[in-house]
Image (cartoon, rainbow, N blue to C red):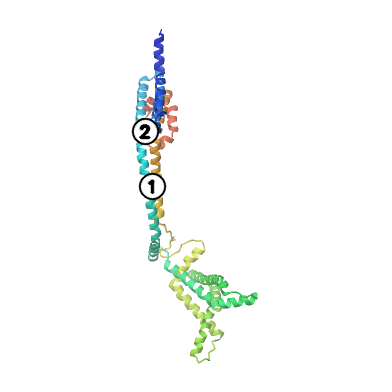
């Protein structure tokens, strides 16, 4: 039989953490220390002290359970390994706090430099944007791709012709609308809608020529006749309402050089206007409009910048990407990676101490560890289900797990 002193010794050994946990926690909390020292103790000492106290209690329970365990030698060895992991985690925690402080200072410096450099690059992109546009336009113009020179000349000629016809026919349209409505209409109010109408007529004329050219390539007589009739009607509309005004403007010049006895007549006026239309349309068509009109019609039809020509029958798409956008994507990827490293420097040191403490209690229950220490990435923190299956499923301990592996 054991006497009272022997039982008191056994109880003291079992509850030995209770003798120092109170003073240790009071020291780690630093309630009576200056504010800065107390804050430093709570940051650097409190968590390791709590982990040591919990580990001592778990070790006491583990040593008592050795009496009824199998594979006692392996279990005791693994208990010492767990304490070794705890020591490494505490030292890693203190080193990690220093590393995190250095990381934070370095991060502030890097992000400040990134903001300054980003502003400078942004200003540089804005200032160099016109030169980049000219460079891209030049490369597109003189390389295989969209016929940009033809497109720009076609649009420019269309706008010029619509502007000229607007000023030529403004007086006629104003007088006609005033007579019909019985109101005085200002020429300024009619010029903008008249310009849009003239632009529509000129573009429509080039689109009919394009359709006629496609019909001639297919050699479909019925389609050629239909498009030819439409082209003749379009020519007559432009000749009667637009080009006739040019011929009327030339009548005083003809009269001056004919001695004043000159009468052109309606036939001569329409004939000269028709030859003028044919000459202008033919020159502009063969010079640039036959290459620029298909692209413009493709855009109007909703097919985008697509044409057939220099690309050997393939669709050529215009895709302009600013280098600043690509640079921003690269910087955002770097920021995400750096943010993961920064978050890891903040989380890994304290979480490793918590994981080492949990490993003590899991060791008492399953003779195995739940977490593999040290943590190397976020996957080892977030994915605990494989570890749970390992310690509660087919594996019956560290020994069987090693043998099966």
SS for tag 1? helix
Residue where numbered disc 1 is placed: 111
Residue 14, horizontal then vertical, whole percent:
41, 17
Residue 60, horizontal then vertical, whole percent:
40, 20
Binning the other alpha carbons within 10 Å of mark 1 as few (below 14), some (14 to 19) or many (20 upward) gives: few
Binning the other alpha carbons within 10 Å of mark 2 as few (below 14), some (14 to 19) or many (20 upward) gives: many
Name the one closer to the observer, 56 or 135: 56
Residue 93, horizontal then vertical, whole percent:
37, 33
Residue where numbered disc 2 is placed: 93
* The N terminus - image quarter: top left
Q: Please, is residue 355 above or below residue 166 in the view?
A: above
Name the one closer to the observer, 36 or 385: 36
- Residue 371 visible? The answer is no
- Residue 22 visible? The answer is yes
Q: Which mark is residue 38?
A: none
Q: Residue at x 36, y 46 (%)?
A: 109
Q: Earlier in the sequence, mark 2 or mark 1?
A: 2
The quarter holding residue 150 reads: bottom left
Q: Please, is residue 290 above or below residue 128 in the view?
A: below
State the residue lying farthest toward the top: 1
């Amino acid at each position: 039989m054991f006497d009272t002193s022997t039982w008191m010794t056994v109880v003291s050994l079992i509850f030995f953490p209770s003798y120092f946990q109170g003073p240790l926690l009071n020291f780690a909390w630093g309630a009576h220390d200056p504010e800065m020292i107390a804050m430093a103790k709570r940051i650097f000492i409190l968590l390791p002290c709590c982990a040591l106290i919990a580990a001592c209690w778990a070790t006491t329970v583990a040593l008592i359970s050795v009496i009824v365990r199998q594979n006692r030698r392996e279990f005791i060895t693994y208990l010492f390994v767990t304490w070794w992991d705890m020591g490494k985690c505490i030292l890693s925690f203190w080193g990690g706090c220093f590393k995190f402080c250095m990381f934070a200072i370095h991060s502030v410096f890097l992000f400040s430099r990134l903001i300054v450099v980003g502003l400078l690059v942004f200003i540089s992109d804005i200032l160099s944007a016109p030169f980049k546009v000219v460079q891209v336009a030049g490369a597109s113009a003189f390389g295989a791709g969209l016929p940009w020179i033809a497109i720009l000349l076609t649009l420019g000629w269309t706008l010029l012709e619509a502007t000229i016809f607007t000023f030529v026919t403004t007086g006629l349209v104003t007088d006609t609308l005033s007579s019909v409505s019985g109101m005085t209409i200002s020429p300024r109010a009619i010029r903008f809608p008249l310009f849009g109408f003239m632009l529509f007529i000129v573009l429509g004329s080039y689109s009919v020529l394009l359709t006629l050219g496609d019909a001639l390539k297919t050699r479909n007589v019925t389609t050629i006749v239909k498009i030819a009739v439409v082209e003749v009607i379009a020519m007559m509309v432009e000749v009667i309402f637009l080009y006739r005004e040019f011929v009327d403007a030339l009548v005083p010049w003809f009269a001056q050089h004919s001695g004043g006895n000159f009468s052109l007549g309606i036939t001569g006026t329409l004939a000269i206007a028709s030859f003028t239309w044919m000459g202008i349309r033919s020159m502009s068509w063969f010079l640039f409009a036959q290459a620029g009109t298909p692209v413009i019609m493709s855009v109007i039809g909703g097919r985008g910048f697509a044409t057939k020509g220099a690309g050997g029958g393939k669709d050529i798409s215009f895709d302009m990407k600013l280098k600043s956008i690509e640079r921003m994507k690269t910087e955002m990827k770097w920021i995400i990676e750096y943010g993961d490293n920064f978050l890891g420097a903040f989380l890994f040191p304290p979480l490793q101490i918590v994981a080492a403490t949990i490993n003590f209690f899991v060791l008492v229950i399953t003779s195995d560890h739940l977490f593999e220490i040290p943590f190397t990435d976020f996957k080892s923190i977030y994915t605990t289900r494989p570890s749970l299956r390992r310690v509660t499923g087919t594996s019956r301990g560290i020994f069987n797990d090693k043998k099966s592996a």
